[in-house]
Amino acid sequence: MRRLGTDKPITTTQSGENGAVSVIVAILLVTLLGFVAISVDVGLIYSERAQAQSGADASALALAQKCGVNLTDPLCSTSSTLAASLANQNALDGKSNVYSIQLDKTARTVSVMTSAKQDGAPQDSVSLYFARALGIDSEKIMATSSATWGTPSRGPVILPLAIAYCKLDMLAGSTAGTEQVLAQSVNGCGGIPGGSAGFKRLQRSVP
């Protein structure tokens, strides 16, 4: 008669693969977080730069218009409040910085540099979200725009010539190619003075 006994516990052979899944998951999570940071934070950066650029463009154009009308206008200066107002209006949250205004009244040029403004973020920067896990907490946002004012010095010359319809229209029965004479001393249609006097007053052409 055999003696009954307890079975020996089943033991498993230890291998070097324990924890491998956890390591792979951790690596994949970091990679996934990087892609999320690219899609969210980079989109935020591009949006903030577009707003800053719009503010800089609007500010530079407005200052150039003010200076073109009157150089002594208080708004035509490096301390103009118009630039800050337009920069804020072009920001979705209504907050923006005018970093600098460079105005040269002699050269008739103005350059405006704007930057981002966000509560709790470093100066001229915006806070990032997912990129913080990668050690990037914020991004600096700057934009520059320049404008000039004055009269044009070059360009095509447009001949200010106007011809009355009754002078241009050929007489009944005439054939194409008939020479038409426009007399300056003769009034136009309906006794209205002709409009071809402008070209006679041209003293010089613009190069």
Image (spheres, rainbow, N blue to C red):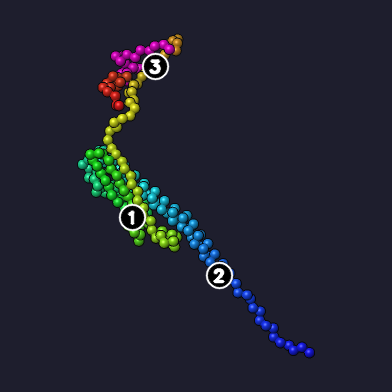
Foreground residue among 166 and 7: 7
In what quadrant of the picture does the N terminus appear? bottom right
Q: Residue at x 38, y 12 (%)?
A: 180
Q: Residue at x 58, y 71 (%)?
A: 16
- Residue 168, label in figure: 3
Q: Is residue 14 left or right of residue 27?
A: right
Foreground residue among 109 and 8: 8
Q: Is residue 11 left or right of residue 144?
A: right
Q: Of marks 3 and 1, which one's residue comes earlier in the chain?
A: 1
Residue 70 visible in the picture = no
Q: State the image coordinates of residue 161 (x, y, percent, origin top left).
A: 34, 21
Residue 193 is covered by the magenta coloring = yes
In what quadrant of the picture does the C terminus appear? top left
Q: Residue at x 31, y 30 (%)?
A: 154
The magenta span reads 177-195
Foreground residue among 121 and 29: 29
Q: State the image coordinates of residue 61 (x, y, percent, origin top left).
A: 31, 42
Q: Is residue 11 left or right of residue 34?
A: right
Q: Is residue 131 above or below residue 174?
A: below
Q: For the residue carrying disc 3, how many other residues have a C-alpha within 10 Å: few (<14), some (14-19), or many (20+)?
A: few
Q: State the image coordinates of residue 59 (x, y, percent, origin top left).
A: 31, 45
Q: Residue at x 24, y 45 (%)?
A: 77
Query: Is disc 3 in contact with disc 1, using a CB cutoff of under 8 Å?
Result: no
